[in-house]
Amino acid sequence: MTRIDRRALFASGAAAALLAATGASLADIPKKGGTLRVAVPRDDSLEQVARGAVFDTLTEVAPDGTLRGELTTGWETDFEARLWSFQLRDDVLFHDGAPLDIQDVLVVLSEVGKVEALSSNSLRLELVEPNPGLPFLLADSRFVITRGGQSVSPLHEANGTGCYSVERAEDMRHFLGRRVAGHYKDNLAGWAETIEVIVIPDAQVRAEALRDGYVDVAAFPDPNDLRGVSGLRYFPSKADSALAVAPNVGVPRRVGEGRALDDGRLAERWWLA
């Protein structure tokens, strides 16, 4: 049987028929372009979204909850889950143009256990105690990979390998990221041309900004100011609206519920429909 190329399929008229057969819609297909605008309170929400946009980790928990590699192409462990090996991608650049070096990863993993390079793109990590859940742990934003172990702050100087580079940023106030051309995740993530995160401390004002079309997503809005507004979607539910989303925004079928902002990955996963 001939293998079907998914990208070619979705670029053709066959996509509509397939989506209809599976119960999906054309709105489920991510589209490139535009500015995705997000209003958040004055807490760590801005930093969560900015980190998810600017930085990568070795592994990533997908919107459906499954684990997948991000900067790593694969990993193995021994029977005890104490000795691990990881293989790195060879097509990753930092936003300043420098290629990802295995030393960048060793610096971060040295906080977890004894680590050594086996080659230019493979390493071995030895834990003090066995941990079968290590790949899930390494998907946490605490373990973002920076160049040479540089700090992730201040935000306006952040230099990562993520889908978006920092165009303008002010801690606890505003973040504007621009999609990186030729990124290794092209056509897989990073749909909006720019992502803008605006801190609006007042929940009522965040709701008003969404209602009046000034933003596309509002975190923890005042539900009273969204009554009667049609077409909005709420996550995880209308009764517990950690996020209110305008109808022009496309989202993955499943959105992470661990944290309100799709586990901090909203910037690269959501799109303007």
Image (tube, helix red, strand yellow):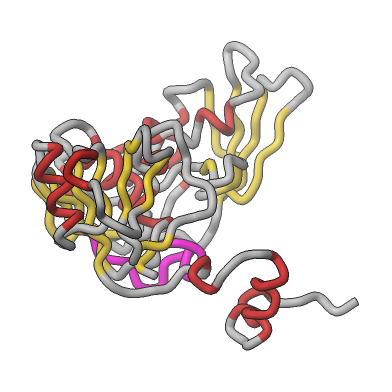
**Outermost residue, right side:** 1
Question: Residue at coordinates 42% horizontally, 23% vertically from top-left?
Answer: 111
Residue 108 in sight: no
Q: Residue furthest bottom?
A: 13
Q: Position of residue 32 (x, y in %)?
A: 39, 74
Q: Please identify the quadrant where the N terminus is shown.
A: bottom right
Q: In the rendered view, does 52 fall on the left or right side of 212? A: right
Q: Is residue 113 above or below residue 90?
A: above
Taking the image as shown, residue 79 lies to the left or right of residue 133, namely right
- Quick one: which residue is furthest to the front in this view? 228
Between 12 and 17, the residue placed more toward the observer is: 17
Please identify the quarter of the rendering in which residue 240 is found: top left
Instruction: Please say if 257 is above or below 228.
Output: above
Question: Which residues are the magenta region?
Answer: 177-190
Q: Is residue 263 above or below residue 91?
A: above
Q: Quadrant of residue 222?
A: top left
Q: What predominant SS class does the magenta segment belong to? A: loop
**197 lies above or below 112:** below
Q: Nearer the viewer, residue 265 or 213?
A: 213
Horizontal side of 1 relative to 5 (left or right) equals right
Q: Position of residue 260 (x, y in %)?
A: 35, 37
236 in the magenta segment: no
Give the camera-side residue of 80 and 104: 80
Does the magenta portion include 178?
Answer: yes
Which quadrant is home to the C terminus? bottom left
Residue at 48% x, 22% y: name it.
112
Q: At which x and y percent is residue 250?
A: 42, 62
Residue at horizontal 43 percent and vertical 38 percent from the top: 236
Could you say which is closer to the camera, residue 50 or residue 215? 215
Q: Is residue 246 visible?
A: yes
